[in-house]
Image (cartoon, rainbow, N blue to C red):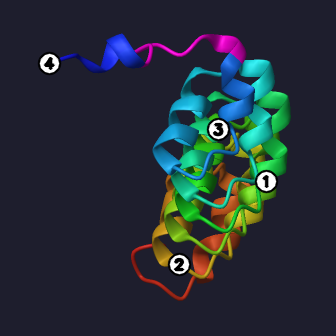
Amino acid sequence: MRRLGEYWPTVVPLEWLPALSTDIDREVRITVADRLPEEQVEVLADDPDYLVRVYVARRLPLGRLFRMLADVDAEVRRIVAERIPQVSLGLLAHDTDVAIRRIVVLRMDVDGLELMKCDSDWTIRYKVALRAESALLAEMLGDSDEAVR
């Protein structure tokens, strides 16, 4: 009995990967996203499968992450929120997913917390209050939630 490696190489050469980026099998495209050189991985940023895009978001150069800010999948946006430069976190301050806004409020510079002081989720406002300077805290004294006040 022959083993797989005798018919097909177990490690595909890097020069074959771009051609495999459009393969119909998601596992193949995930492997491609994981192995392509960092400067080439963006070709899979619009892949229809969220998990392929997750791999892309993990590996995409920081300057290219902005194209994934509005990805339809929250897991992709979560990775973007964890990796995007701190100065750009305001772009995700009003994301529809509260878990992403939690990452933003924890990573955001204290000066940027003003953006999140009126968040619809009390836990976000609470985290703002924990980190805010006195001027912003004074504005939050009238918050509708007792824990935030």
- Type of amino acid at the residue the image marks with label 3: Val
Question: Regarding mark 2 in the picture, which secondary structure is present there?
Answer: loop
The N terminus sits in image quarter: top left
Sequence-earlier tag: 2 or 3 = 3
Question: Residue lying farthest front?
Answer: 1
Question: Regarding mark 1 in the picture, which secondary structure is present there?
Answer: helix
The answer to whether mark 1 and mark 3 are in CB contact below 8 A is no
- Magenta span: 8-15
Distance between mark 2 and mark 1 Cα atoms: 17 Å
Distance between mark 2 and mark 3 Cα atoms: 30 Å
Residue 124 is one of the magenta-drawn residues:
no
* Looking at the image, residue 18 lies above or below residue 96: above
Which residue is labeled 2 in the image?
Answer: 121
Which residue is labeled 1 in the image?
Answer: 90
Examine the image and state in which quarter residue 109 appears.
top right
Which residue is labeled 3 in the image?
Answer: 56
* Other-residue count near label 4 (Cα within 10 Å), few / some / many at <14 / 14–19 / ≥20: few
